[in-house]
Amino acid sequence: MSTHNGVGAPARADPVGFLDDAARAVSDTVLYEGYLLYPYREDALKNRHHWQFGVLMPPAFAAAGTGEHSAARTEFLLDGGPGTTLRIGARWLWEGGGARGDAAGALSVRVGELAGEPVRRGLVLGGPEPGRGELLLGAQALPGPYGGYRIHATVRNVSVPPGQPPADRDAALGRAFVAVQVVARAYGGCFLSLADPPEWAADAARACVNERLWPALLGGPGRSGRSGRSDTVLAAPITLPDHPEIAAESPAAFCDATEIDEMLALRTSTLTDAEKLAARTGDPRAAELLASVAELAPAMAEKLHGRGRVIPPPTPGPAPDATPGAEPAVGSAVRLRPRPGRMLTGPLTGLASGAATGSDAQDMFIDGRAATVAAVLHDVDGRTHVAVTLDDDPGADLRREFGRFLYFTPDELERQ
């Protein structure tokens, strides 16, 4: 059953209620990405042209050379057997008749049922227009002794407009599935990361085909007990890393196409009373957003400023190897000895450029100074980059908190 969550619409059973709170929060955020843009008024130019992500137009409009599409496809890997149960759903937004809302459709199926003909679930757009779509599901057993399946999911808009297909995009949006995403949860199995699959599934991960939907694991690696696995996956119209989370500091769902919360909170507070009134009366989500910013306490606003996260270094192990050029341990004490002609490194790039250009102009100021190793990094070319903080730098604590280090190669460090 589809939900129909427009203004004044009745509440119905949630087809994607199998998502837990953390997964639902990420799914909601992606669903409304780009829904409203500052200054949140409908008469603003950038809010007159909605929806850039995950738009599935009626086939007739998509086939007219508009650059739009009517279908999206995702594939992801399941470590499970034919008896594993999957609950899979599609979510989307709709607009039409001056209203907007969200809707969803889902089904529960055993993997063994997907190995033959695709399983189809009809989708009802949910708005005032009689738009329709379908969710097609299939599964293919992975070759080799380890088992597992590649799951296929395709979302299609199959709406047939009355008479001639509309030539205007705004008119066609009345039967479009917007911000489409696919969510799934496994019972008796788990999904594998496509970005970091286990070795036995690496070839299968590379073979997955994703068009306008890209899967990412949800829920954190701790839920499955093993890295690169989770019982929940989100295939979104924007690319996400595995295990994305909503920042605890975010006071509201700004839905503003990846803008940072602090900037939007400050800019929103500069709107005139007339602009705020226009935003509130134009959309209930805009009214909710403005209210949340107006009630933002100073302590909450302070949390949005310059916040960074650095994974704490592990407890130092045995004394590092004193062999020149050997990789130092995190937390070890070193003395800086930058060599002439070294590769350029720096806190802005964080990695060596690969070109030897002579000594850095700042080498004379740091040669011989004591430092502590904060991290040891390796690039794709196999080079090692050692991040350090100066022991006599009064701002060393801030540099560690924000991840702003000085970088050297191991042979430029003299062990203490």
Image (tube, helix red, strand yellow):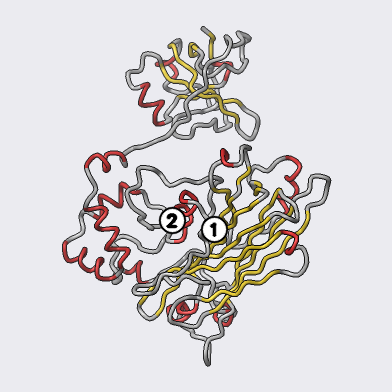
Residue name at image x 42 percent, y 34 percent: 309
**Residue 277: where, in percent of width, then height?**
20, 66
In the image, 115 versus 175, the foreground residue is 115
How far apart are the alpha carbons under marks 1 and 2?
11 Å
> In the displayed image of the protein, which residue is found farthest to the bottom?
163
Query: Dividing the picture into quarters, in which one does residue 328 lie?
Result: top right
Whether residue 142 is situated above or below residue 156 in the rendered picture: above
Q: Dot 1: few (<14), some (14–19), or many (≥20) neighbours within 10 Å?
A: many
**Residue 33: where, in percent of width, then height?**
43, 59
In the image, 276 versus 243, the foreground residue is 243
**Residue 8: where, in percent of width, then height?**
34, 74
- The answer to whether marks 1 and 2 mark residues whose Cβ atoms lie closer than 8 Å is no
Residue name at image x 31 percent, y 46 percent: 262
Mark 1 = which residue? 236
Whether residue 369 is situated above or below residue 357 in the rendered picture: above
Mark 2 = which residue? 29
Query: Dividing the picture into quarters, in which one does residue 32 lie?
Result: bottom left
Whether residue 51 is situated above or below residue 206 in the rendered picture: below
Residue name at image x 63 percent, y 41 percent: 228
> In the displayed image of the protein, which residue is found farthest to the left?
273
Question: Which comes sooner in the sequence, label 1 or label 2?
Answer: 2
| SS under mark 2 | helix
Whether residue 392 is situated above or below residue 341 in the rendered picture: above
Numbered circle sitting on residue 338 = none
Residue name at image x 57 percent, y 72 percent: 69
| SS under mark 1 | strand
The kind of residue tagged 2 is Thr
Report the side of 302 relative to 227 (left or right). Answer: left
Query: Dividing the picture into quarters, in which one does residue 210 lie?
Result: bottom right
The kind of residue tagged 1 is Ala
**Residue 350: where, in percent of width, then height?**
49, 32
